[in-house]
Image (tube, helix red, strand yellow):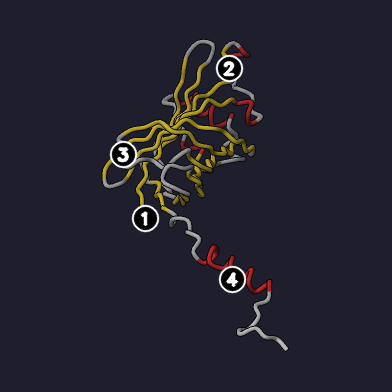
Amino acid sequence: MNSSSGPLIRPSLLLLLILLPSFAFKPSHADPVKWILTKECTLKVNGSTNINKFSCIVPEYVQPDTLICYKENKNGPLKISGSMALDVQKFDCKHAVMTNDLRKTLKAKVYPKIIIKFLNLSKYPDLYNREEAIKGAVTIELAGIVKHFEVDYKYTMTGNGNLKLIGTKQVNFSDFNISPPRKLGGMIKTNNELNVEFVLNIKTLN
């Protein structure tokens, strides 16, 4: 006969009782933060030819979108889900011929949108720090080609927890299988490099 004064506990049940608290009390991730991209967002490309420089801008973002930000901890990297799509036909170079050339070069009729998909930031912007430089990653879809880029950002707090995030990156026409435009039988040649700057005006929602 079994002389034990209490019921036996099976090893598998005992293991479950040991592990259960670690699952039950495991801290969850913080709730995601919503960033609303306002109409004040812009996109600028600066380039040059063998005789001059040019600057072309999409002056406003007419269809505000929402970015969802997931922060693992206060000082850790920030994952982002969301994108913005800008109309290539909205580019304005302040010169009609140059504007038309850029739109044609970027294949605006076939691929009317530039899509910037935001992937991450190196940290969540510090609401108590008025200005700081951080890093991040995006993909840019242009002329049917998608490329991954590391971006340099500078942010400025604009009050009420809202912020302005300015991203800059040098890209090449050739990154997107595009040949830089030429004029006058090749006498005027556009250089391959473009400096891209996008300004995000963000309203933050918890």
Callout 1, which amino acid?
Answer: Asn
Mark 2 and mark 4 lie on one chain; the one further toward the N terminus is 4
Q: Residue furthest bottom?
A: 1
Q: Are marks 4 and 1 in contact (CB under 8 Å)?
A: no
Element under label 2?
strand
- Residue occupied by mark 2: 183
Task: Where is residue 23? Give x, y as percent.
Answer: 55, 64
Identify which residue is drawn at 58% across, 67% down.
18
Element under label 3?
strand
Q: Are marks 2 and 4 in contact (CB under 8 Å)?
A: no
Task: Where is residue 45? Give x, y as percent.
Answer: 48, 27
- Position of the C terminus by quadrant: bottom left
Mark 1 and mark 3 lie on one chain; the one further toward the N terminus is 3
- Residue occupied by mark 4: 17
Mark 3 and mark 2 lie on one chain; the one further toward the N terminus is 3
Mark 4 and mark 3 lie on one chain; the one further toward the N terminus is 4
State the residue in front, 156 or 147.
156
Q: Nearer the viewer, mark 2 or mark 4?
A: 4
Q: Nearer the viewer, mark 4 or mark 1?
A: 4
Q: CA distance from mark 4 to mark 3?
A: 49 Å
Mark 1 and mark 2 lie on one chain; the one further toward the N terminus is 2
Q: CA distance from mark 3 to mark 2?
A: 43 Å
